[in-house]
Image (cartoon, rainbow, N blue to C red):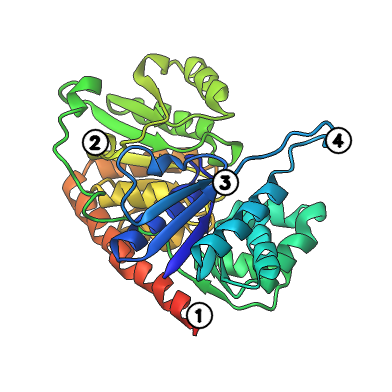
Amino acid sequence: MKIGILCYPTYGGSGVVATELGKELARRGHIVHFINSQLPVRLDGDGFSDKIFFHEVSVPNYPLFSHPPYTLALAGRVVQVIKEQGLDLIHAHYAVPHSLVAVLAREISGQARVVTTLHGTDITLVGTEPSFLDVTRYAIEASDCVTAVSASLARDTRELLAVNKEVHTVYNFVNPDIYRPVPPAIREVYVGEGEHLLIHISNFRPVKRVPDVIEVFARVRESVPAVLLLVGDGPQHCHALAKARELGVSEHVCFLGQQREVVPLLSASDVMLLPSEQESFGLAALEAMACGVPVVASTAGGLPEVVADGIGGRLLPVGDTRGMAAATLEILGNPRRWREGALERAQNFSSTRWVAEYEALYRQVLA
């Protein structure tokens, strides 16, 4: 199949999943075309193959427009690629604007089917914004096939947008050949003998509750020596820094910024902290478990479907930093048992299984 992929090019979950899906599809022999204003971060470096292509979108900047018309420019570029490359389908990740763009390009070109994958905030936040509600609903209803990354998100879509379209649950995934435990040599850079290493990875948006990560860590340090790695960047960076200073743990918190290679950092860690306000899936949690790292997270959204309380880690109510600290100490007290549980849980989300689910839906749409 010849497949076009529309996604955000940044470190956020939807863009990462879309890019990894494209790479897996290429490994299976499909021709994959990414269409975007910039190269997706997971394609940078060794992400390309002879079956992966990138088509850049140029956005005109006329004085007439108060804002650059990216959505229209993207739609026009998608139409061009459909016609020039003979695409069979467009897989749009995130409802606004990508699903809407894909539907428009299909109508203009008269070619290519549209598969839309919903990732979370496109429904729970953007989709319920009054000005976006009707166009989001239209994009979903007009798609040839719609998937969501968790049963929780599929349910939210039906309830919040009142759509009639069937929404298939297709979970996110990891390639177990890439996300697996590796020798934790980097650990000695951050901790000494007898110290524990905790980690948090996110885009540092308010929904991730990064100050809660600091609070959980501070409570853990009241009982055991530990260091916290914060991987990523975003709006709550300064809030997290201020919280660490307020609680007197700033010397034990390492802000690492955005990192392309997280497997060595995960493999060196003892526990992943993910106290999010909302998570449609929780890809960071899955990546951690695949590297043998148990997760302490909130019960928000799709996290219970991913972590499974008592197997891949522990789940507590949003904001329960005291409970999360206690759960972290519980895991640190029996690391082998929880490591085995994390690895076992991650096996349910292998790329082999879930990329095959997407392929089956593609064939169904094209039949």
Name the mark nearer the viewer: 4 or 3.
4
Secondary structure type for disc 4:
loop
Q: Is residue 213 above or below residue 246?
A: below
The amino acid sitting under disc 4 is Leu
Q: CA distance from mark 4 to mark 3?
A: 40 Å
**Circle 3 crowding by C-alpha within 10 Å: few under 14, some 14–19, many from 20:** some
Rendered location of residue 314, percent (x, y): 37, 51
Whole-angstrom CA distance, mark 2 to mark 4, is 49 Å
Does residue 125 appear left or right of residue 305 in this picture?
right
Q: So how many labels did they put on this image?
A: 4
Secondary element at tag 2: helix
Taking 245 as reference, is 141 above or below it?
below
**Residue topped by disc 1:** 366
Q: Nearer the viewer, mark 2 or mark 1?
A: 1
Which SS class for mark 1? Answer: helix
Q: Is residue 52 left or right of residue 275?
A: left
| Mark positioned earlier in the residue sequence (1 or 3) | 3
**Percent position (x, y) of residue 165?**
65, 77
Residue plotted at (31% across, 37% down): 262
| Mark pair 4, 1: CA separation | 41 Å
Asked whether 310 or 350 is in front, the reply is: 350
Upstream in the sequence, badge 2 or badge 4?
Answer: 4
Residue extending farthest front: 84
The image shows residue 227, relative to residue 136, as above or below, that is above
What mark, if any, has residue 277 been given in the picture? 3
Q: Reading the chain from its start, which is encountered first: label 3 or label 2?
A: 2
Q: Which mark is residue 64?
A: 4
Most extreme residue toward the bottom is 367
Q: Are marks 2 and 1 in contact (CB under 8 Å)?
A: no
Label 2, label 1: how many angstroms apart (C-alpha)?
40 Å
Tell me the residue that label 2 is attached to: 264
| Residue 337 position within the rendered picture, expressed as x and y whole percent measured from the top left | 19, 52
